Amino acid sequence: MNILANFPLWAALIAIVFAQGVKVPIQFIATREFKPGLAFSTGGMPSSHSAAVAALTTAIGIQHGLSSGLFAVSCVFSIIIMFDASGVRRHAGEQAILLNELVKDFQYFVEEAKVWTEKGEYEKREELKELLGHQPIEVFFGGLTGIILAIILYPLF
């Protein structure tokens, strides 16, 4: 199969790009904060992981049928990825928030304990990435995004 005509691959890639790109306007509408960096980060609404695997699975289902072994494999791996995105990765992000807060509190304590005249520049520490996983609603809309995009893209292939 010619890679340029590989509908499942292109559906998944387009879903990733779309989901990542749409995070910026969604964040702006929700919070009035313009954060273009969201287009290149993990986490946020919608889940690009979920959009990608849902688009891939939908495209495989359209192309090979819902009773094919390939669809079954893709569907199971999609479920695992979406479960992981809303479970383990989200909890790791919540732990990162807590650890970052503890580091800030400790640095504040150390800074205040010093005598003002003896204060020097202290080493800045890189914060842990807090936006790792997704809320279940973000995974749901990521999956829905992928399914809709695959259905819309199918006639183009």
Image (spheres, helix red, strand yellow):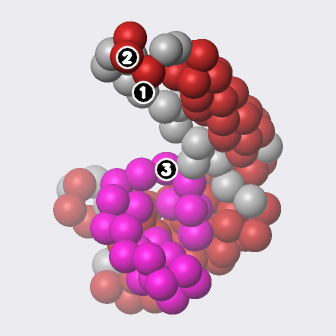
Q: Mark 2: which amino acid? A: Thr
In space, the residues marked 1 and 2 are separated at their CA atoms by 26 Å
Highlighted range, magenta? 22-48
| Contact flag, marks 3 and 1 (Cβ < 8 Å) | no
| Contact flag, marks 2 and 3 (Cβ < 8 Å) | no
State the mark number for residue 3.
none
Residue 56 appears anywhere in the view: no
| Contact flag, marks 1 and 2 (Cβ < 8 Å) | no
Residue 1 appears anywhere in the view: yes
**Image spot of residue 92 (x, y percent):** 70, 34
Residue for point 63% across, 22% down: 109
When the figure is inspected, residue 120 is found, relative to residue 11, above or below; the finding is above
State the mark number for residue 126.
1
Residue for point 31% across, 19% down: 121
- Lower sequence index among marks 3 and 1: 3
State the mark number for residue 117.
2
Quadrant hosting residue 144: bottom right
Q: Mark 3: which amino acid? A: Thr
State which quarter of the image contains the C terminus: bottom left
Residue for point 31% across, 67% down: 36
Let me know if residue 99 is in the magenta part: no
Quadrant hosting residue 100: top right
Q: How many marks?
A: 3
**Image spot of residue 80 (x, y percent):** 74, 43
**Neighbourhood count class around disc 3 (C-alpha, 10 Å): few under 14, some 14–19, many 20 upward:** some
State the mark number for residue 42.
3
> Of helix, strand and loop, which one carries label 1?
loop
> Of helix, strand and loop, which one carries label 2?
helix
Q: Mark 1: which amino acid? A: Glu
**Image spot of residue 40 (x, y percent):** 34, 55
Quadrant hosting residue 9: bottom left
Let me know if residue 25 is in the magenta part: yes
